[in-house]
Image (cartoon, rainbow, N blue to C red):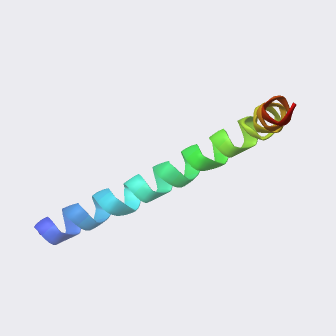
Amino acid sequence: MWYVIIHLTFVLSAFVMGYLDRLTRHQTIEPSSTVNQSGKG
């Protein structure tokens, strides 16, 4: 039973991390390009 709980915890955390990665990746596309330009200039 413990194996099931641990496995579901890891699977759920993987989905949450993927969802957060998708959200943050969409939001940081524009600022990262401006940071790169300001760093080069």
Q: Quadrant of the C terminus?
A: top right
Q: Measured from the top left, where is residue 40 in percent x and y?
A: 83, 36
Where, by quadrant of the figure, is residue 27 drawn?
top right
- Horizontal side of residue 12 vs 34, given as left or right: left
Q: Measured from the top left, where is residue 34 in percent x and y?
A: 83, 31
- Horizontal side of residue 40 vs 14, given as left or right: right
Q: Residue at x 33, y 61 (%)?
A: 10
Q: Residue furthest front?
A: 41
Q: Residue at x 78, y 33 (%)?
A: 39
- Horizontal side of residue 35 vs 41, given as left or right: left
Where, by quadrant of the figure, is residue 32 drawn?
top right
Q: Measured from the top left, where is residue 7 in percent x and y?
A: 27, 67
**Vertical side of 7 occupied by 24: above or below:** above
Of residues 14 and 3, the one nearer the viewer is 14
Of residues 25 and 7, the one nearer the viewer is 25
Q: Residue at x 69, y 45 (%)?
A: 25
Where, by quadrant of the figure, is residue 28 drawn?
top right
Q: Quadrant of the N terminus?
A: bottom left
Q: Residue at x 39, y 53 (%)?
A: 13
